[in-house]
Amino acid sequence: MKLELHILQNFAPSNLNRDDTGSPKDCELGGVRRARISSQCYKRAIRQAFEAHELLDAAERATRTKRLVEAVAEHVEAAKKIDPESAKRAVVRALAGGGLKAEEGDTWKTQYLLFLPTRTIERLGALIAENLAVLASPPAEATAEPAGDKAGKGKGGKSKKQEKSEAKDQVPAALREQIEALLSDGSRTPELGLFGRMIADQPGWNVDAACQVAHAISTHRVSMEFDFYTAIDDRRRDDSSGSDMMGTIPFNSACFYRYLVIDVDDLVRNLGGDEAARAQARKTLAALLRAAVLAIPSGKQNSMAAHNPPSFLLTDVRERGAPRSLANAFVEPVRPRSNEHNDLVEGSVLKLGELLAALDGVYGTDGRKDLSFCVVDPSQTLAKAFGQKVTSAHHRASLQALIDAATAAAFGGGA
């Protein structure tokens, strides 16, 4: 069972997702430049929406960090009343036993940016505190050795792989197994189940994402613009002139097509595969739909305040068949036609409906369980026009009604 979410969202002048030059990201589609917001940017905005709108229980949340040592050490300090340095060193040894390298000293960061359940931090802290006598003891080889070179060598000429293996062996086998079990466990964690996890050195810990998120692209041609700004010193003398600071900020304004697809069966499997996981997956799916709709990237918002909710939402629930992005509806860029009272949003909605109807005609509906849409349309003329193009679509009056229909269909209930 797959659930697809299509969103059309028009933003006022903004710079929500910048490239390495500070300009809004863009791309080419249909031979013209389009505004773009990366999928990574939107996935983070969705995860932030989970927290901001309290859509997931705190115990279910995940965290992405390289500062695992400090986070776990806080629990060890509290449990054993030891100094921070000793707690951090014990955590570093424990992580080494689990196959993860962490630096000691100023940073105390892990080798990788880790994505793991927040509950793991507390549980790992409790396990280390319980075994502090073993983990706080110095390594068997404590003699000073020359620093490694830059060609993959560690201390004493040993390879980094050999060093990692020896550090792992210094932790008792039974304790190693417990540490590895905690670090590898990604079940019952919606964010991991949705967005997955990949650790090159620990393939057994990987989680295949149940949710795929596309880059958002503008439905029309976009041009880059620049805001020239100046700043005046509040305490300058009255006889002085000119600004005390000046610069430019690139920005654009665009109607974006956004798309994501969730494999519901994969989500249930990632969460544990049992009845409890199925119930959690249903709740997670509802939370994801709401978070995806409410998510707005934070780039330059203090300067632009582009807090514009989506104008159009479409959910498509099918029990088989390949996903169908509707991005190709905009290969020919939308153009506003004032004489037809057809703005960029309206034009985008109608073009999306035309392609959806055409795809259904050629490829069929693949066991469609529900097709619902919701539109911000005071006059209701746009809702009627879309319904005429896609006659099988159900018009839902609110976001909540749309979410209820989609989740019910995805889990075998009526729309």
Image: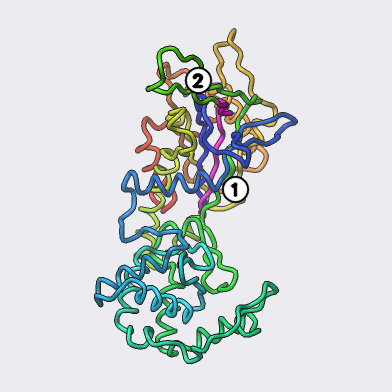
Q: Residues within 10 Å of mark 1 (few under 14, many from 20)?
A: some
Q: Is residue 11 left or right of residue 287?
A: right
- Tell me the amino acid under the disc marked 1: Pro
Q: Which of the 4 image quadrants contains residue 349?
A: top right
The answer to whether residue 28 of the structure is visible from this angle is yes
Labelled disc at residue 195: none
Q: On screen, 13 above or below 208?
A: above
The residue positioned 37% from the left and 84% from the top of the image is 136
Find the magenta span and give its range.
247-262
Query: How far across and down, in percent of the image, does residue 123 sit?
Result: 33, 72
The answer to whether residue 308 of the structure is visible from this angle is no
Labelled disc at residue 243: 2
Query: How far across and down, in percent of the image, does residue 125 sit?
Result: 33, 73
Q: On screen, 342 above or below 174?
A: above
Quick one: 30 or 250, which is closer to the camera? 250
The residue positioned 61% from the left and 29% from the top of the image is 219
Quick one: 105 or 346, which is closer to the camera? 105
Quick one: 321 or 148, which is closer to the camera? 148
Query: How far separated are the C-alphas under marks 1 and 2?
Result: 54 Å
- Of helix, strand and loop, which mostly describes the magenta segment? strand
Q: On screen, 156 above or below 7?
A: below
Q: Which residue is mark 1?
A: 323
Query: How far across and down, in percent of the image, does residue 100 sit?
Result: 50, 74
Q: Which of the 4 image quadrants contains residue 202?
A: bottom right
* Magenta span includes 190: no
* Magenta span includes 261: yes
Element type at mark 2: loop
Query: How far across and down, in percent of the image, does residue 62 sit?
Result: 40, 59
Q: Which callout, 1 or 2, points to the residue nearer the camera?
A: 2
Q: Is residue 27 left or right of residue 289?
A: right
